[in-house]
Amino acid sequence: MSQASTEIVRISGHAGTVPGAGMNREFQVCKLVDTTTCIGCKACEVACLEWNGYTFTETTFDNTYQTMPETAWNYWNLIKFNEHEREDGSMMLLMRKDQCMHCEEPGCLEACPADAAIVQYANGIVDFQEAHCIGCGYCVTGCPFNIPKFSPEAHKVFKCTLCNDRVSVGLEPACIKACPTGCLHFGTKSEMKELAQTRADQLRDVSGFADAGVYDPPGVGGTHVIYVLHDAKNPQLYGGLPKDPHIPYSVWLWKKPLKWLGNLAMIGGIVGLALHYLRVGPKKEEPISPEDRRPS
Amino acid sequence: MSTTDTVPHSRTSTAFDEELIPRYTFGERVNHWFGAVTYIYLLMTGLAFWSPYLFWMAAVVGGGPTARFMHPWFGLLFTASLFWTFKEWRRDMQMDDDDRKWAHEIEAYINNEDEKLPPVGRFNWGQKLFFWGMLFSIILLLLSGVALWYTEALPWSLRYLRYAAVLVHASVALITIGLFLIHVYMSTILEEGSFGSMVHGNVTRAWAWTFHRKWYYQVTGRSQPKQ
């Protein structure tokens, strides 16, 4: 697991081949968040701040237990609360740990123009390299989960690293380490998928949650943070988890067809103008006709 | 002017043809080159953000973060330059019937058979198209650019503005690149005398007579001879 994060799969805005590709065997990591056993204690929020060196700042009260409305550039891990009334009139207090999902097909990386500002490692971690970030904010547009956040002070964008620094030396992420209920798990993608499925089956078969399931959205190629939800048919109930996340269509149009059409048009235009000159040559002034030289 | 604008016998016809006529004022030239410099900065930084293979252009103008920081400000400067041009030239840039006839015969222009074209005023149909194209483009670039400048200020509920902005900004920028390439090609190497006129401000009588005959009659006060 540890060496896997030294191998790079993709680099944003990078011309040419990727250094060190194919060095190691594939070994994908995954974080499992079981929303059904989360008690909303926010130990993970504190652990995240502690490990990543951010101080606890002022919170925003919005009539729930939530610390602030959404994650911030210096607050990468946030428990989202939602009081949900079910059809039978009973209440559920839904809690979901929100952070970067570490998509297999990351929209941030797709949109990023800066060479090596966003890196996807072979273990699945998508990490921002702030030293290379130019602060354009295209990643904010590319992300379907509202995760990258711009720092007005640094003029750079920050987000959860999945504790890449810990994972690369064989430790689990700080949030996992702090969780008191065991609703957070960390391991390989296949192990976590299996564990999540077992828990979802249990919820369905034993606890009476007919729609319980695992959230590993295929629209972004799967994610390296997966959820167990009581109601997998309505993920948006869990603090706005998108039902079918994918890279925004306009970002796709811009980065794929428009880019090729544009490049073709620019090169074609230059070639066309050069050919025009070779064919018809310059426009030269003509001598003024005799009747126009006459005094008027 | 018309009374003095004659050919004395002492002068040869070539000397008459090569006499200079002012075409662009000092202010117009300063504004043109101010716009040119700001546009080229925008082009280089914009292309750097457009393709990884052109990211080196950002390094040339001070590095990625600097390019990102300055691009919107240069956008405002270029907009100011274009708006000033609009204020000064908007009457010269109105399309008239001769322009529409000219546009119909554009093939002759492309093939350098200018003598087949209807007479042209201060600017021809293509120049007018370039001007209005740039003006409308800059308005769209400005609107989409604001959404990209302060991307983080747009809340998640307004993310569709971001989605529209990235697409509009890139598409319209490509249109301006097309206009820019044609403009630079025509005014530097295709039409001899054009580039100099934007440097020292003057053109020869023959140049004005060949390419902008209506304007030539107008500024020299000569009347158009009966056909």
Image: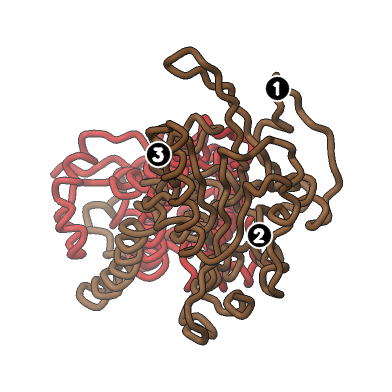
Chain colours: A brown, B red
Chain of the residue under label 3: A
Q: In this view, does A74 lie above or below A38?
A: below
Q: Which amino acid does label 3 sit on?
A: Asp
Residue of label 1: A62
Q: Residue at 57% of width from left, 77% of height from top? A: A4
Based on the displayed image, in which of its 4 quarters is residue B58 positioned?
bottom right
* Residue A217 point in image, percent of width and height: 41, 49
**Along the viewing direction, whichever of B182 and B149 lies nearer the viewer:** B149
Quarter the C terminus of chain A occupies: top left
Q: Is disc 1 surrounded by few (<14), some (14 to 19) or many (20+) residues within 10 Å?
A: few
Q: State whether discs 3 and 2 lie on one chain.
A: yes
Based on the displayed image, in which of its 4 quarters is residue B215 positioned?
top left
Q: Can residue B132 be seen in this view?
A: yes
Q: Of label 1 and label 3, which has the lower sequence position?
A: 1
* Residue A1 point in image, percent of width and height: 59, 75
Residue of label 3: A205
Chain of the residue under label 2: A
Q: What residue type is labelled 2?
A: Thr
**Residue at the far front in the pictured view:** A206
Q: Residue at 37% of width from left, 52% of height from top? A: A218
- Which element type, helix, strand or loop, lies under badge 2? loop
Q: State whether discs 1 and 3 lie on one chain.
A: yes
Q: How far apart are marks 3 and 2 (CA)?
A: 35 Å
